[in-house]
Image (cartoon, helix red, strand yellow):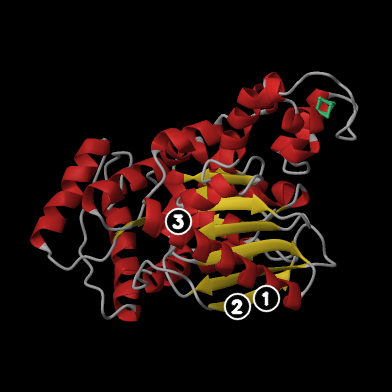
Amino acid sequence: MRNHENSADYPKKRVKACKENWEEMTLTLKDFQIEEVEVLNLNEEEIANAVARTYVAEQNIKAVIVLGITGPLLIKKLKKIFGIPFLSFDNVILSVVGRSPLARVVSIVSTFSEEKTLLTYKAIYEFIPNQIYVLNSKDIGEIPQLYRRGYHIIIPCSAELISELESLSNRLKGLKEASIENPLSYFKEEICSLNLAKGKPSTYKIERILPCIADSSKIRFIAQLDVNVEDLLPILYLHLKRSNYLEALDTLTFTTDKEEMITIYGNGRVCAGKVKDESRAKEILLELIDLLSKAYNYLSQHGSPPVEMLEARRKLNPNVVYNHLPKLNCGKCEEKSCFTFAIRLVSGEKKLSECKPLIEEEKYRKNREFLEKLFNPLL
Ligand code: SF4
């Protein structure tokens, strides 16, 4: 199913390529029934309706795979409507970037209209600025320049280009360490994880350990938890100071106090970069299981956090914090000014309790309560 331009034999060629890819997936995923829906030049509502037609006819659908570019927000919307996951090429791009923190990725799309569509979905760039470069297939010759700028992972982002993986790799010979990722293998992994039930995590499996792209003395790893943790991510977001939650992508990214960069996916996948070694990786995963278990207990007792709570967390910024500090610039917190203290509070380097006047003086009680709630909405 896809959404693209309408030149004479273009759709036919594309549908053929899609069909071949469906066939490949059908062979690998015998338990999954594959239905092909042709969608040309449709808006969001029409895409939803096209999916609905298949959905109604088929009772046991576990997921819908969109062989095209749609945008994470639409995918999330469809998931809400149908209650099943939707996987698309842009999920794959984000997944590859998430698995290789700090990697730079060139995503090749096959037409200008797709390039525009992808660029429209700004969430991708807000999430990982300067990590994704979208290239039209006509400009493949520019890859060597992009390679020099640090873009080493290349993802062909359409059914047509996937069927030309070999010729693409030939064109890129000589670019050491440049890897071409086949999005289909990511779809397969995602589909396998769909069988995981939601719950409290108890174990993990480290699937891959690779050199860290940002720091060659460190490693990055990919692991899988034993449950789906989608409902626990917003709770973790409220709890972790240096975190970013993207609801549309079902991902939570955070930085640890050792500056490791961790991404957790709703389907229980965990990817991390700048990690010292394998034993630290195991430590991180155990700490994560502990945190997620606490989030699970919170969810069982209080339910999902309200939208307003998440919005307040998103607004957490040094200005708001500063306006509720005593503004004495007394230095008791070992910072030069209340404003630097506010910045460090927001970044998680300082604790509210380090501002003695705020904690000890009754006249700041209201401000203190406001800030305590802002920083610990789950208390
Ligand atoms: S201790 Fe509180 S009042 Fe004093 S400088 Fe630090 S933040 Fe400002």
In front: label 1 or label 2? 1
Q: Residue at point 43% right, 71% down?
A: 227
Image-based side of 10 in relation to 307, left or right: left
Residue 282's tag is 1
Q: Are marks 1 and 2 in contact (CB under 8 Å)?
A: yes
Q: Is residue 232 shown to the viewer in this render? A: yes
- Mark 2 Cα shell of 10 Å, populated few (<14), some (14-19), many (≥20): some
Image-based side of 257 in relation to 205, left or right: right
> Where on the picture, by quarter, is residue 134?
top right
The percent coordinates of residue 84 (x first, y second) are 27, 58
Q: Is residue 42 shown to the viewer in this render? A: no
Q: Name the residue under label 2.
A: 206
Q: Residue at point 80% right, 38% down?
A: 354
Image-based side of 111 in relation to 151, left or right: left
Q: Is mark 1 within 8 Å of ligand 1?
A: no
Vertical position of residue 324 compared to residue 351: above or below = above
Label 2 to label 3: alpha-carbon separation: 27 Å
Q: Answer with the quadrant where ligand 1 appears in the image.
A: top right
